[in-house]
Image (cartoon, rainbow, N blue to C red):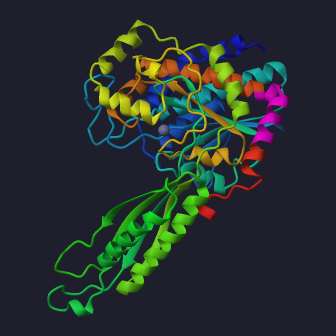
Amino acid sequence: MDKKTIFSLIDENESGLKEMAFDLWAHPEISHEEYRSSKLQKDYLAARGFTIREVLNNPTSFIAEFGSGRPILGITGEYDALPKLSQKVSSCQEPLTSPDDAGHGCGHNLLGTGGVGAVCAVKECMEKEGLAGTLRYYGCAAEETLAGKPLMAKEGVFDDLDACISWHPSFLNVLWGCDFMAMNSMKFRFKGTPSHAAAAPEAGRSALDAVELMNVGANYLREHVVDAVRIHYAITNGGGLPNTVPADAEVWYYIRAPKRQDVRDTAARLIKVAKGAALMTETDMSYELLAGCYNVLPNRAIGNAMYENMCAAGSPGFGEEEFSFAAEFAAKLSPEAKRSVMETYFAPPEAAKMILCNEVLKNFDDGKLMCGSTDVGDVSYIAPFAQMTAACWPVGIASHTWMASACTGSSIGVKAMLFAAKSMAATVYDLFTKPELLAEARAEFEQATGGEAYCSPFDE
Ligand SMILES: [Zn+2]
């Protein structure tokens, strides 16, 4: 099937996809609470002939499947929103409901719906051409807390994939070639002995002392870890009252590093620091891994195919309406804020001159390391994986902002989403019909991972 025909399959579903994207946007749900959002997608896919499988350890995740046998190809989608980013489709900051409510400031309403659109188009190709194989859409909950996909991976749901792709809303249309930081999110809890702080301090053992000593230890640890490691913490329970020796205290740590192994090593040493703090203060320590993820391994063979399909799809096709809406935001963006966002994404200087990106850029971030983290990294260490970004908001706007929330509910977001859906559908079609591409992707994957098996951070 030629690519234009595949693209037209997305266009035919435009109104349904638009409706889904706007519906998710208008009913934002944060991580682990995406019951309505996941149901909306499940019902849509079930009505189109996909078999729905639940994910046992993650009730708001699911898998929609069509076909049988090999190859097994997947697209991952997300639909969780972010707290306190409620915003109208407006260039003035104005919450849609209340400032405390959630909003789609990372565009996951578009991310998930773009994936749904792509698999529906590929399914039609498979039926028309009698293509063999299995097609899957992974409805992935809780990306924002980085717990969703590692929990799914713990259950082995990605293990038999031959390849997987995805996309993410951003401000440029480009193949995403960069790596991201692996991460652990951990809480350390200390239990001491309460006592009157003035009358009988000798009888008390302070859990807060333990937290403070742990933080001192962690700050000394920084000098002796690999350069790129980042350790951040917040005291989430400091004890409460000064006149009672605190019996309970808690500190929340993030550890980020360029490779999963560096996170594992640093976490193991941080646990020793926590044990030391407990020993010094005669308190009891326990810890919990809230989330953990791998860094990202982009597959260049699939990425090259994806880039060609992005070029074939052309552009999001923004018109006057989108450019004038984008100009309203551009007028409010300070040059410093724009420069900082461009640097974070390694964007070339010519991109900074744009207000809204309506073309496909050549990759510029291959081999670079992004400072953030994403749980799609876990999938990239289980099967060959590539992803792209599409311009869902004006150039220089950061994700996780009210400005991004405003645009992901606008025609800018939807047009970019349809462009991403076309690029992804054509790429999965290539993977179904070109065994040599799949073989090349697999060989690259084996070489990059050295055959080392994936282990979910929850099983480490
Ligand atoms: Zn996101």
Residue 166 rendering spot, x and y as whole percentages: 61, 34
Q: Is residue 357 above or below residue 438?
A: above
Residue 172 in percent (x, y) is at: 49, 24
Quadrant assignment, res 194: bottom left
Query: Can residue 433 be found in the magenta stretch?
Result: yes
Task: Name the dominant secondary structure of the magenta segment.
Answer: helix
The residue closer to the viewer here, 323 or 366, is 366
**Residue 436, image x and y in percent?**
85, 30
> Which residue is nearer to you in this view: 89 or 44?
89
Question: Which region shows up in magenta?
Answer: 431-444
Identify the residue at horizontal 83%, vertical 20% (top origin).
129
Left or right placement of residue 205 versus residue 412 in this view: left
Q: Work out whether 434 lies above or below 321.
A: below
Horizontally, is 258 left or right of 447 in the view? left
| Residue 88 pos. (x, y %) | 31, 27
Figure quadrant of the C terminus: bottom right
